[in-house]
Each structure stands twice: as C-alpha cells, then as structure tokens.
Image (cartoon, rainbow, N blue to C red):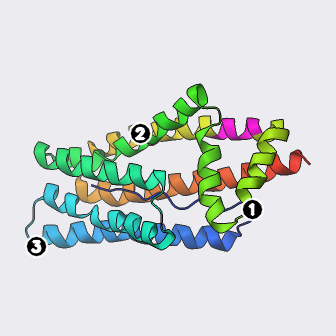
Amino acid sequence: MTTTTPPTAPAPAAGRGTVLRQTAISLLVDAGLPYLVYVVLTEQGMSDVAALAWSALPPALNVLVQAVRHRRLNPVGVIVLITIAAGLVTSLLSGDARFAVARDAIQSVAFGLLLAGSLVVGRRPLMFHVCRFFGGAQRPDLPALMERQWDANPVFRRTLRRATGAGALVMALEAALRITLAYTLAPVVALPILSVQSVVVWTALSALLVLSVKRAVRAGR
C-alpha cells in the first residue's frame, strides 16, 4: 500500500528551490522508502499484503514528524493518517494485494469530495484554507493578506474557486487511474509507479495553487 503525504504548499513568495526541495523529500519518503520496504520484506518471505502494509510506515512517520516539528497536526495530515489506518485494516482483512495497492484511492476520493463540497456548502473554498494554513507557517503575513484579497479582489476569489474545482477533478482522475493500474499491473510494478504518480499530482497542485494566487493578487492591485 502506498500513501503519499501531500507536500507542504509553499507560500506565494517561495522560490523554485523550495518547491524542488520539498518535491525531492516527498519522492524519497513517499515513493523511495515505501518501495524499498516492500522489496526488502518480500525478499525475506513476507506476503505481498503484509509488506504493502508495512510500506505505509515511512509516510505515516513523516506526518507525525511534521506535526511535532510544527507543533500542530494539519487537516491534510489527519486525512492521510485516517486513510493509512483504513487501508491497513481493510487490506489485511481482504488479503488481496491488488486491493492493498489500490486502497490509497480513498485518500484522493476523500480530498476530492472535501474540495467539491467546499464549493457548495462552504463560505470559502477549501483551497483558500489550505493555502492560508500551509503558507502562513512560512510567511506570517500571508493569512492577513489573503483575507484582504478575498474581501476586495474578485479575481482572487474566482481563481481560488476554480483551483478548488480543478483540484477535485484531478483527485477523481488520480483515484480512477490508481485503481486501474493496481488491478492491471503486478504490485511490484504498480507500487513505484503509483507512488511517483501521487507525488507528481500533489506537487503539481501545490505549484498551480501558488501560481494562481500570485497572478490573482497582481490582478487585483
């Protein structure tokens, strides 16, 4: 089972080096280490299902380390831990390695539903809160800036709503592709592909959000 910890969205003022560094760390923790754990354990005779369950340990530890480091557990981290726990239980109960690989589609579906739901019932889209939460940890003045832009800049509001809708669609497509590949390819092949896929998807969403916020803020000046 592969579980990707969404990379921390850089603040709008963050440079390219910050994004690349976060992506590299995410590739190591969420793609490289889980695959290494799976390969080592299966070579030692452990079943695919059990090895896939253990491969979720590095991303789970990463969430906890980030929580201790920042002295708070962010909402996305909560979703990741819940889906890891659900994946471990259901995968072990099912005994199906393909199901264990595909199980992380829950994470994408859950986040996609939250994104879509925030456009319907929320006063502000979820992407606003995600950017405000993560960006505020790196740039203390960002939350106040976003509040002002939301109140006075219609382009800013429209951009974040569109980004939220796009994120929901991407999460749905990611989940569908994950399930398809998990049931088409062998676990040893699907695991690294899907791990990298998740990192690429989350990183691309973060970069798109940052770029959109920058352009929206400039348009409102």
- The picture places residue 171, in percent across and down from the top left corner, at 48, 41
Q: Is residue 164 magenta?
A: no
Amino acid type assigned to the residue bearing label 3 in the image: Gln
Furthest toward the top, the residue is 120
Q: Which residue is mark 3?
A: 44
Q: Nearer the viewer, residue 196 or 66?
A: 66
Question: Which label is found at residue 141?
Answer: 1
Mark 3: few, some, or many residues within 10 Å (few <14, many ≥20)? few
Question: Is residue 161 a member of the stretch shown in magenta?
Answer: yes
Q: Which residue has dot 2 on it?
A: 110
Above or below 112: residue 136? below
Q: In screen coordinates, is 221 left or right of 215?
A: right
The kind of secondary structure the magenta stretch mainly shows is helix
Q: Residue 152, relative to residue 72: is it above or below? A: above
Front tag of 2 and 1: 1
- In the image, the segment drawn in magenta is 157-163
Amino acid on which the number 1 mark rests in the picture: Asp
Residue found 13% across the figure and 42% down from its top: 94
Q: Are marks 3 and 2 in contact (CB under 8 Å)?
A: no
How many numbered marks have been drawn onto this rendered protein structure? Answer: 3
* Point 59% across, 31% down: residue: 122
| Near-viewer residue (114 or 56) | 114
Residue sitting at 73 percent across and 58 percent down?
142
- Residue 140 coordinates in the image, percent (x, y): 70, 65
